[in-house]
């Protein structure tokens, strides 16, 4: 299949890698998205943050595990999986255009103008994760695609189940963008969360939501946090 690098075109920054862990690929017709779990320095523009093989293995295994579980329990909330190539470490997903964030950038508009009920749909996805006993920290709007008017969640490499943890933020610095790290550090000082010491998964989930206040409306963040009360 013909695939090409997929970037987010950010005003003032230009083409930026779509993901910090894997290499993002897309078909020319924007119908297939590929998560390629390899270290690809050209794609990451020499800024690879995850180069340790064991860490990449761990992220790949989490992606497959939780994506397959979502396919089983909530197939309507994730894109249709076209193929999982274990040998090449590629996951092919059926999409219908660029991700939610890129759509808003391309059209210079709000999420509401793209998908009026996006909040309700995203909260449904978050509630599904909570009901399964999961904590998913990949919340960026580039982690969602729209297919036939339905929001689809991707990026399960940063997901933990309730029987895991606690974990430290420090151990996950490599797959949290520097900008996101700065935002999280602002909040940990306010709520007394440690960067270096293990913290409960639910505490870090709420911290995660807080760190996305620049991406989502305040009322949405509060509703998301209440799901984990």
Image (cartoon, grey):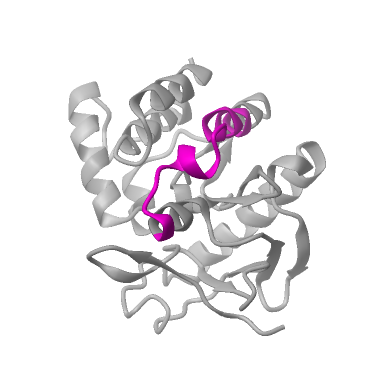
Rendered location of residue 2, percent (x, y):
67, 85
**Residue 54 drawn above or below residue 154:** below
From this viewpoint, is residue 86 visible? Answer: yes
Q: Is residue 111 magenta?
A: yes
Rendered location of residue 125, percent (x, y):
62, 34
For the N terminus, which image quadrant? bottom right
From this viewpoint, is residue 163 visible? Answer: no
Q: Residue at x 46, y 20 (%)?
A: 223
Q: Is residue 18 magenta?
A: no
Which sits in the foreground, 91 or 162? 91
- In magenta, the rendered stretch is 106-126
Q: Residue furthest right?
A: 72
> In which quarter of the view is residue 110 placed?
top left
**Residue 81 drawn above or below residue 163:** below
Q: Main secondary structure of the magenta part?
A: helix
**Residue 7 drawn above or below residue 196:** below
> In which quarter of the view is residue 185 placed?
top left
Q: Residue at x 53, y 56 (%)?
A: 99
Rendered location of residue 4, percent (x, y):
56, 81
Which sits in the foreground, 195 or 39? 39
Rendered location of residue 54, percent (x, y):
52, 66
């Amino acid at each position: 299949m013909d695939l090409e690098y997929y970037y987010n075109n950010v005003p003032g920054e230009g083409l930026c890698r779509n993901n910090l862990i894997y290499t993002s690929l897309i078909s020319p017709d924007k119908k297939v998205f590929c998560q390629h779990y390899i270290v690809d320095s050209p794609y990451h523009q020499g800024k690879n943050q995850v180069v340790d093989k064991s860490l990449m293995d761990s992220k790949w295994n989490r992606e497959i595990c939780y994506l397959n579980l979502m396919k089983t329990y909530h197939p309507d909330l994730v894109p249709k999986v076209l193929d999982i190539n274990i040998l090449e470490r590629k996951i092919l997903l059926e999409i219908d255009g660029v991700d939610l964030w890129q759509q808003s950038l391309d059209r210079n508009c709000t999420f509401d103008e793209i998908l009026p009920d996006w909040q309700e749909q995203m909260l449904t996805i978050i509630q599904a994760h909570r009901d399964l006993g999961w904590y998913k920290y990949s919340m960026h709007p580039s982690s969602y695609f729209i297919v036939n008017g339905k929001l689809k969640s991707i990026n399960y490499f940063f997901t933990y189940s309730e029987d895991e943890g606690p974990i430290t933020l420090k151990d996950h610095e490599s797959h949290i963008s520097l900008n996101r790290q700065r935002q999280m550090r602002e909040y940990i000082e306010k709520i007394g969360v440690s960067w270096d010491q293990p913290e409960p998964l639910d505490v870090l989930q709420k911290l995660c939501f807080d760190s996305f206040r620049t991406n989502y409306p305040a009322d949405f963040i509060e509703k998301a946090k209440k799901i984990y009360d």
